[in-house]
Image: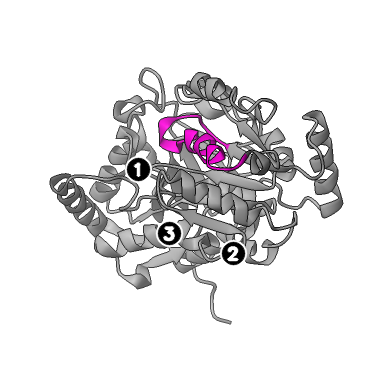
Amino acid sequence: MVLIFDSHPVQYKAPVYQRLQQLRPGSFKVIYATDASVRGHHDREFCKIVAWDQPLLDGYPHLVLNNERGTPLTGFRSLTGRGIRDLLQKERPDTVIISQFIYEFDFVTYLNCVRLNIPIWIRQETQDEAFVRPAWKQSLRGLFYRIAYRQVSHAFYFGELNREHLLLHGLAPERLTFAPYSSPVGANIDIPTRQRLRTTKRDELAIRPDEIVLLFSGKLIDKKNPHLILDALEHLTAGERNRFRLVFAGSGPLEPSLRVRAEKFPDRVHFAGFVNQSEIASWYFAADILLLPSRRAGETWGLVVNEALEAGCAVIMTKAVGCHPEFADWDRVRVIPDNDAAACANALRELAAYPRSFDWCAERMKVYSIEATAAAIARQFDVLNPAPVS
């Protein structure tokens, strides 16, 4: 039995657990500190109450410990380690997977596994280029990870920067398994349905068939740097701008300032507000180009890139986005320097030349599917309990 310790149900992890249960039924259980993401909680960055509307707790064994202190998911002490030692002693798992080192919950799990001599695996998206840090802080951080990883017997990595981090801090290559981020958004939707959803959504916004829709999907926060998209539009000629419509699908503290700046582009910018999981696919199908112009302030991966590629969009992202090494050489992907509006404008000109296709990268995206991720984890489960030789 494997126990997977995670802070809360997440819309891109639950489908992996659901598929993993189908592949290896009864071999694992997910232990959540809180289910706030399902029942609803105030997200400071979305600036609203958020409750994901997908069945994130269905189809796989799980336990919610309700280890909340104050407002959950707001800091180290907001998720406690209450009851973890007793749980580990009762379950006696073959191994434990820790999903992050952020909360008290995570560190209590780690320390109790060490005390009880339970093997530790990790599946976390940590990498070393997400922030600009002073040398002393980088050294101290590196020391922490080198010490912590001495107790880790295996790690699942999401991508190249995550892999480099694990190798740098002491994990040997043979102790690593590629289990990337994957997105259920748009998966298993046939092309006629995608076209219908695209047409319906664009008609709602009175977008002409020949207009190119730019999409920003996510929190309107400084880390994501959504203002760069408006900066890029100002680098275009009036004639070029008239080819584009921009949609901000999300909410956050930068929305008022974005709305003020958007007044320079009458009828060119639409604010969709927070979009839940059941509705987001139609926005990706309606769009042509996704933009993720993040700063180097913690964008460790950038899951919206997966979602956009799954829907067949072209993508522009900055080098601050953690997944840029994976997708930089794809035909309809452009990686630009951080905070470079002119480079973003040039990328828009280049990608505008491509006709819309829902499946231009479908074959390559199979590597980043729910099926591939779950299968990679399942194969490592088999190492714990190998099939008998007949």
For the point 51% across and 25% down, the residue is 46
Q: In the image shown, does 367 or 361 lie closer to the viewer?
A: 361
Marks 3 and 1 in Cβ contact (< 8 Å) = no
Callout 3 crowding tier (Cα within 10 Å): few <14, some 14–19, many ≥20: many
Image vertical order of residue 166 relative to residue 50, above or below: below
Is residue 25 visible from the viewing direction of this image?
no
Disc 3 is placed on an element classified as strand
Q: Nearer the viewer, mark 1 or mark 2?
A: 2
Is 171 placed left or right of 345 in the picture?
A: left
Q: Position of residue 232 (x, y in %)?
A: 52, 41
Crowding at mark 1 (Cα within 10 Å: few <14, some 14-19, many 20+): few
Residue drawn where x is 39% and y is 55% of the image: 95
Residue located beneath label 2 in the image? 367
Tag 1 or tag 3, which sits nearer the N-term?
1
Label 2 CA crowd tier, 10 Å (few <14, some 14–19, many 20+): some
- Residue 234 is inside the magenta segment: yes
Under circle 1, the secondary element is helix
Colouring chosen for the image of the structure: one colour
Q: Is 46 above or below relative to 115?
A: above
Q: CA distance from mark 1 to mark 2?
A: 37 Å
Give the amino acid at mark 3. Answer: Phe
Range of the magenta residues? 217-237
Q: Which residue is mark 3?
A: 156
What is the distance, in whole Å, between disc 3 and disc 2 at their CAs? 15 Å
Which residue is at 31% across, 45% downward? 131
Mark 2: which amino acid?
A: Val
Q: Position of residue 231 (x, y in %)?
A: 50, 37
Q: Is residue 81 left or right of residue 185?
A: left
Q: Is residue 203 left or right of residue 279?
A: right
- Numbered label attached to residue 89: 1
